Amino acid sequence: MARISLIAAMLLSAMIGSSATAQVEIAPPHQKNASVSNSKFVAMQRPDQWVFTSFKGTEVVGPDNAKLGSVNDLLFDGTGKIMGVVVAVGGFLGVGTKNVAIDMSAFDVVPVSSGGNDTFASNADDLSKVKLKVGWTKDQLRAAPDFKYYRAPARGTPSTGATPVQPIPQTE
């Protein structure tokens, strides 16, 4: 029994030692000619992924399949998580259009109906053949809050957005 434990300990030690020597040390990114870790790069687009250049302008439809607007922008946080899709609603040729930001979970990807026997599987990877569907009508989206883009405060102004308070004059 002791012999089996000794052999197991030796094998475990050999595996740990060999894996430690087989590891490649990655140089910090600030070093010249540093090797690159592939864990932070995406080499190619998968069939279940879309790029924004194809996504922008995608038609957004309501529950009755009536056109409500189109994708205008994406809102994402500092970690890269998409927080919402900015949809241009209403207007004509950009006049009278308002932007509404909608959470990603509110959308369903549906195929464009061409009147034929199109199937979702054949259209899902081609954004020219899909629409985004939401559960709201055009009137409901017009009543939704207008999305405001962040504007950095001008230099020399308070960053809180509050108006500076003027001192109250003293009277005697």
Image (spheres, helix red, strand yellow):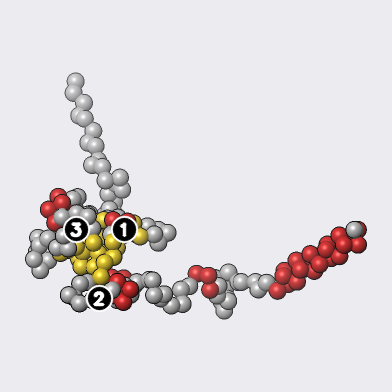
- Can you give x and y, in whole percent of width and height, for residue 117 in the image? 23, 76
Q: Which of the two labelled residues, at mark 1 and mark 2, occupies the earlier sequence position? A: 1
Residue 132 as seen in the image, left or right of residue 39: left
The 10 Å Cα crowd at callout 1, few under 14, some 14 to 19, many 20 or more, is: some
* Of the two numbered discs 2 and 3 in the rendering, the one whose residue sits closer to the viewer: 2
Residue, far top: 172
83 above or below 160?
below
Task: Please identify the quarter of the rendering in which residue 19 is found.
Answer: bottom right
31 above or below 61?
below
- Can you give x and y, in whole percent of width and height, for residue 103 in the image? 30, 55
Residue type at tag 1 = Met
- Circle 2 residue: 118
Residue 21 as seen in the image, left or right of residue 95: right
Q: Which of the two labelled residues, at mark 2 and mark 3, occupies the earlier sequence position? A: 3
- Circle 3 residue: 63
Q: Residue at x 23, y 61 (%)?
A: 133
Task: Please identify the quarter of the rendering in which residue 29 is found.
Answer: bottom right
Query: Looking at this view, is 79 or 140 the one in front?
Result: 140
Q: If the image is split into quadrants, where does the C terminus sit?
A: top left
Check if mark 1's residue and mark 2's residue have beta carbons within 8 Å: no
Residue type at tag 2 = Asp
Residue, far front: 117
Give the structural element (helix, strand or loop) at label 3. loop
The 10 Å Cα crowd at callout 3, few under 14, some 14 to 19, many 20 or more, is: few
The disc placed on residue 104 is 1
Disc 1/disc 3 C-alpha distance (Å):
16 Å
- Can you give x and y, in whole percent of width and height, for residue 165 in the image? 24, 37
